Amino acid sequence: VDAPVVVQQIVDRFALAYMYESMGGPDWTEQFDFMTDESACEWSNGISDRGAQCKNTNGIVNDINLEENNIKGPFPPVFYHMQLKRALLSENEISGTISTWIGTMDKLFEFWVHQTSLSGTIPTEIGNLTIMRGLGLYKAKFEGTIPTEVGNMASLTRFWVNDNDLNSTIPSELGRATKLHTINFRASSLTGTIPTELGKLTKMVKLYMPHNSLIGRVPSELGNLSRLQWLLLQDNTITGTLPSEIGQLSKLKYFDIHGTYIHGNLDPIMCTGTNRFPDLVGFGSQCIPESFEGSLSRTVCSCCTMCCNDSSCKQQEAQPVECEGRCVACADNVYMPTCEECPTVN
């Protein structure tokens, strides 16, 4: 066996033993044979895809799955000297911060530490992990900015950072990570505008940005995302009219802009024609008038499945409009999804 391999095997055993001793090992839900005389490759208790495993022929631990295992405390520094390809550690009471040493783990392609007590900032060095495919940091206690260096992660397909207190803008550099198919920014205290560069992410399937403080208009460039199925923008301070290019997203299943200041007639963009969005099952907008007398709804939307105002929402049956979306305002500020003139109201 090569000397570097033996050295790494020693490092692995020490790192895992240190994690066990410093992160509450005796109280773990499953012990996985940690601290036994077996090779660290066997510290899995024979459970497939759990514990520590060596998915190779050289005896180096490259995979750990300790999710939901009552692990407590910060990562020991030696953790960052393992040659892991996959680290699944979510739904534990892991605390502390992610060290800048994360940037040296250049074999890592899956890193999921969501639903933990990890805090501090997301280190810029994470952008060094150019083969990373899945990064899950959601429902933790991270703050600060989303590093622009995330745009260097050329292999990244899934980026989940929702439900943190980031108080960040969305970096335009993210548009360089062109393999992304899922981004979740939900409820992360995001500010600023939606970058036009997101329109370069043509593999995108799910784009979640609700419950933030985003401003400005919906970029017309999002109409380039021909594979997009989920586009959630609700509860932001987004303004303006909906760009007609959104009507090109024929694969949409869920689209929500309620709780925003988007206004205007959505029917010509979203509701006219036959089977424009054959898979659309959820569509929400501000299409109920406010409660004060004389108010009009912020949007006209015949094919919305959920209509809202600033105080409530209600489900409705979508009504595709077969004409060119010429809707007329009738009595009591109700918009009729029809090509006919409004009936006479006594």
Image (tube, rainbow, N blue to C red):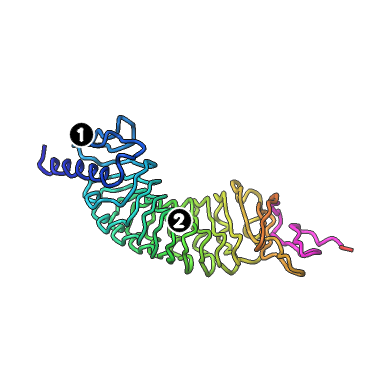
> Which residue carries the number 2 mark?
162
136 or 21, which lies in front?
A: 21
- Amino acid at dot 1: Ser
> Which residue carries the number 1 mark?
39
Closer to the eye: label 1 or 2: 1
Task: Indicate whether 122 appears above or below 43.
Answer: below
Q: Residues within 10 Å of mark 2 (few under 14, many from 20)?
A: many
Q: Earlier in the sequence, mark 1 or mark 2?
A: 1
Using the rendered image of the protein, determine whether residue 151 is visible from the camera's viewpoint.
no
State the image quarter where residue 341 is shown: bottom right
Label 2, secondary structure: give it. Answer: loop
Label 1, secondary structure: give it. Answer: loop
Task: Indicate whether 66 appears above or below 266.
Answer: above
In the rendered image, the quadrant that contains the N terminus is top left
Q: Which residue: 50% across, 52% down? A: 228
Q: Which residues make up the magenta segment?
A: 319-344
Q: Is 212 positioned to the left or the right of 121 in the image?
A: right
4 or 331, which lies in front?
A: 4
Residue 118: numbered disc: none
By secondary structure, the bulk of the magenta-drawn segment is best described as: loop
Using the rendered image of the protein, determine whether residue 182 is visible from the camera's viewpoint.
yes
**Where does residue 313 sit, x and y in percent of width and height?**
66, 56
Q: Is 128 positioned to the left or the right of 337 in the image?
A: left
Q: Residues within 10 Å of mark 1 (few under 14, many from 20)?
A: some
